[in-house]
Image (cartoon, rainbow, N blue to C red):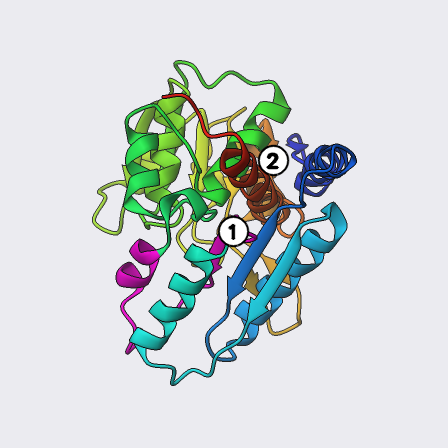
Amino acid sequence: MSAKIIDGKAVAASIRSDIKQAIDARKAEGLRAPGLAVILVGNDPASQVYVNHKRKACEEVGIISTVLTPEADIEQHELLELVDRFNADPDVDGILVQLPLPEHINESTVTERIRPDKDVDGFHPYNIGRLAQKRPELRPCTPYGVMKLLESTGITTRGARAVIVGASNIVGRPMALELLYADATITVCNSKTQDLPGVISQADIVVVAVGRRHFVKGEWIKPGAVVIDVGMHRGEDGKLSGDVEFEAAAERAGWITPVPGGVGPMTVAMLMQNTLEACQLHNEPPLD
Ligand code: GUN
């Protein structure tokens, strides 16, 4: 293997440690701790695991978390009422509704109900629009975390050719906006893209978020490229793997994220960061 490993676990731990320090300093000044409200609808096992990670991280850094777990058959208007309750609660700085939601609930309606200044997922059109206009406020956690991982390698994004594989609202699209904000040259691929291997082989930076195990082959990677794998799949043997053929890609890449221990811990760390930033915003509103 020639690639260096991007240790997301270590970068995330360092970010959480900085957040803990900032929260301790707030409390020492007599300011309140940040508050995060999480709504988890139904009992999807993967979502339960993710929410548990978020709750534990809150505890570690000193964020006060509240987790509500309504049944899967909750009516949309009842869910919106829960969001309204947290929107109005002065002790709640951040609100997160875990996705996916049951079929009968419209995800956009719920996401757009969250006050933009409490939207710590960064999914509200206001926050996506701010990022699109180079004036980010609360930034989508996974792409924001990927930018921190790229920063940790010391490679420059300015002028780099970045290829994003996957165009979802949660990862691919905001990832493109983040990389554009960092002055990279962006290509976003979707299921209709022609000659995907050819496009990927041009990339200095490849971010893969397609949700298909080992979808990107090692031989497609340009020698020396940075490979960021957002995928996470559990095999029948219980082992986790990503959207990229790790071993083969690591033979060619300059840097690569492992799965697990790459992007995953960063998503949670950036959620903590956003909750702290939202809290600071609520205490010290910006002048503009
Ligand atoms: N489901 C998968 N990833 C996420 C995320 O980052 N936030 C929320 N709210 N739901 C998710």
Which residue is tagged 2?
A: 251
Task: Work out how far the residue at label 1 is from the one at label 2, CA to CA, in angstroms.
Answer: 51 Å
User: Residue 245 appears at what percent x and percent y?
Assistant: 53, 49
Indicate yes or no whether the magenta region holds residue 103: yes
Does residue 59 appear to the left or right of 263 in the view shown?
right
* Mark found first going from the N terminus, 1 or 2: 1
Observer-side mark, 1 or 2, equals 1
Total tally of numbered discs in the picture: 2
Q: Residue at image x 51%, y 40%?
A: 278
Q: Quadrant of the N terminus?
A: top right
Mark 1: C-beta under 8 Å from nearest atom of ligand 1 = no
Q: Amino acid at mark 1?
A: Pro
Label 1 residue SS? loop
User: Residue 250 appears at what percent x and percent y?
Assistant: 60, 37
Of the numbered discs in the image, which one, if any, rests on residue 167? none
User: Residue 268 appears at what percent x and percent y?
Assistant: 60, 49
User: Residue 34 appears at what percent x and percent y?
Assistant: 62, 46
Query: Can see residue 101?
Result: no
- What is the span of residues highlighted in magenta in the rendered image? 90-113
In-front residue for pair 122/64: 64
Q: Residue at image x 37%, y 23%?
A: 181
Does residue 15 appear to the left or right of 249 in the view shown?
right
Q: Amino acid at mark 2?
A: Glu
Q: Quadrant of the C terminus?
A: top left
Does residue 126 appear to the left or right of 228 in the view shown?
left
Which residue is tagged 1?
A: 90
Query: Can see residue 172?
Result: yes
Q: Residue at image x 28%, y 78%?
A: 104
Q: Residues within 10 Å of mark 2 (few under 14, many from 20)?
A: some
Indicate yes or no whether the magenta region holds residue 179: no
